[in-house]
Image (cartoon, rainbow, N blue to C red):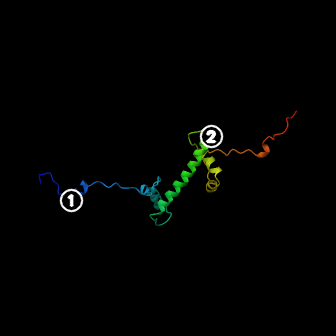
């Protein structure tokens, strides 16, 4: 007993290299939290049971939509010579894209402003000078 060796159960397991646990987000190569989405689906009273693939699929869809909106908003910010995406850039990105506008038609974006739009009737015609 006094020789320093330990015969306790589990001592062999501790000496082996530790296996790093991978989250479901890492396994699915996603940035969005699969575990959190699964918990929210279970606690949200959407269905009595939630399959294992449902939160992975939902996380992938949410990540794709977010990436698409951010890509377009980044382009809008770049067009306005800005380096920071603000709500107005999100508004421009969504309203100028036909499919995103249809998906988010009933959504109001706070501080989003309006799309620049001047009626053709109000524009000055290129005619001769007045004198």
Within 10 angstroms of label 1, few (less than 14), some, or many (20 or more) residues? few
The reply to whether discs 2 and 1 touch (Cβ–Cβ < 8 Å) is: no
Tag 2 residue: 80
The residue sitting at 65% across, 54% down in the picture is: 98
Distance of mark 2 from mark 1, alpha carbons?
66 Å
Residue 93, percent across and down?
61, 48
The residue sitting at 49% across, 65% down in the picture is: 47
Tag 1 residue: 9
Within 10 angstroms of label 2, few (less than 14), some, or many (20 or more) residues? few
Q: Nearer the viewer, mark 2 or mark 1?
A: 2
For residue 104, what is the image quadrant?
Answer: bottom right
Closer to us: 85 or 128: 128
Residue 28, percent across and down?
45, 58
Q: Does the image show residue 60?
A: yes
Quarter of the image that includes the N terminus:
bottom left
Q: Does the image show residue 111?
A: no
The residue sitting at 62% across, 42% down in the picture is: 79
Q: Is residue 131 left or right of residue 81?
A: right
Q: Is residue 118 left or right of residue 40?
A: right
Q: Is residue 74 above or below residue 64?
A: above
């Amino acid at each position: 007993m006094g020789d320093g060796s330990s015969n306790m159960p589990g001592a062999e397991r501790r000496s082996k290299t530790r296996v790093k646990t991978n989250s479901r987000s890492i396994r699915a190569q996603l940035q969005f939290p699969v575990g959190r989405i699964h918990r929210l689906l279970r606690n949200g009273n959407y269905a009595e049971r939630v399959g294992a693939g449902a939160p992975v699929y939902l996380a992938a869809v949410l990540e794709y939509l977010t990436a698409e909106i951010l890509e377009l908003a980044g382009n809008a910010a770049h067009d306005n010579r800005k380096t920071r995406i603000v709500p107005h850039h999100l508004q421009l990105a969504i309203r100028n894209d036909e499919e995103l506008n249809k998906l988010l038609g009933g959504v109001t974006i706070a501080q989003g402003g309006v799309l620049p739009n001047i009626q053709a009737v109000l524009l000055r015609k290129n005619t001769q000078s007045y004198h």
